[in-house]
Image: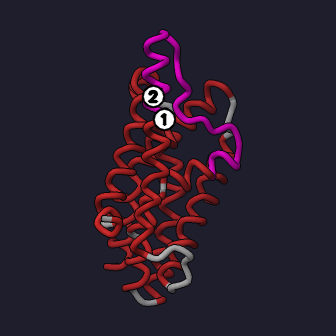
């Protein structure tokens, strides 16, 4: 029970930002038909599987990138977020709308999930390295259930009128800002800047 509770807290704490992305994807699916709902579900599952697999490999010492350099992954969401904010600012000046989450199919949803979850790679390997095999398996099962729950919540949030209004009004700013925050958090929290300096 303690392992399950810890895994639930770990999943929720590292994937809160993912709810915004999922809500936007489901909203986009309702409005434009892309990506399709099954592509969101499958892409989220596939992307999270990649994150957990890389984390387990890193915990086993088989990662290509040494732990002290994993924090450089923070540059990916930071760059995507900065780019998104620049596009949002440009569109705002011109009075245009920006698509918040540019995912059109299974592969792009999967890629978005991996990029959005890059911060998980600074946390999960350490967790998997310190718990036993049994606890690791329980944690992975909890994560799998968490992906299903997150997709259900994202679908629900994407259908709520108030949430939809907020996302339509501020979404082009919210997601890039979350990406920038994740990137900064990874870079600062991982200690990679101290390693470089």
Q: Where is residue 152 in the image (x, y as percent from the top left)?
A: 52, 47
The residue at 34%/51% (across/down) is 184
Q: Position of residue 193 (x, y in %)?
A: 32, 62
Local crowd size for mark 1, using a 10 Å CA cut-off: few (<14), some (14–19), many (≥20):
some
Quadrant for the N terminus in the image = bottom left
Asked whether residue 8 is in view, the answer is yes
Looking at this view, is 161 or 190 the one in front?
190
Q: Is residue 83 magenta?
A: no
The residue at 42%/59% (across/down) is 119
Q: In the figure, 6 relative to 42: above or below?
A: below
Asked whether residue 9 is in view, the answer is no
Residue bearing the label numbered 2:
86
Q: Position of residue 164 (x, y in %)?
A: 45, 26
SS for dot 2 = helix
Q: Find residue 57 and name its label.
A: none
Looking at this view, is 190 or 154 the one in front?
190
The residue at 59%/30% (across/down) is 28
Q: Would residue 28 appear left or right of 55 to someone viewing this image?
A: right
Q: Quadrant of residue 194?
A: bottom left
Looking at this view, is 176 or 169 the one in front?
176
Q: In the figure, 136 relative to 73: above or below?
A: below
Residue bearing the label numbered 1:
83
The residue at 38%/77% (across/down) is 127
Q: Please report contact status of discs 1 and 2: CB closer than 8 Å, yes or no.
A: yes
Q: Position of residue 107 (x, y in %)?
A: 70, 49
Give the residues drawn in magenta, as a range.
84-110
Q: Quadrant of residue 15?
A: bottom left
SS for dot 1 = helix
Q: Would residue 66 appear left or right of 16 to someone viewing this image?
A: right
């Amino acid at each position: 029970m303690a392992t399950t509770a810890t895994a639930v807290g770990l999943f929720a704490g590292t994937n809160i930002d993912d709810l915004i992305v999922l809500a936007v994807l489901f909203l986009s699916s309702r409005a434009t038909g892309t990506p399709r709902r099954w592509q969101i579900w499958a892409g989220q599952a596939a992307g999270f599987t990649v994150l957990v697999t890389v984390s387990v490999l890193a915990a086993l010492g088989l990662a290509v990138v040494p732990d002290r350099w994993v924090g450089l992954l923070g540059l990916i969401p930071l760059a995507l977020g900065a780019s998104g904010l620049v596009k949002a600012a440009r569109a705002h000046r011109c009075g245009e709308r920006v698509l918040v989450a540019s995912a059109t199919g299974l592969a792009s949803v999967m890629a978005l999930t991996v990029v959005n979850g890059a911060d998980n790679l600074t946390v999960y390997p350490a967790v998997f390295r310190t718990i036993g095999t049994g606890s690791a398996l329980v944690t992975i099962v909890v994560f799998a259930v968490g992906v299903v729950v997150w997709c259900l919540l994202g679908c629900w949030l994407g259908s709520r009128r108030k949430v939809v209004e907020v996302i339509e009004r501020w979404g082009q700013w919210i997601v890039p800002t979350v990406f920038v925050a994740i990137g900064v958090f990874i870079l600062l929290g991982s200690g990679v800047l101290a390693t470089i300096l």
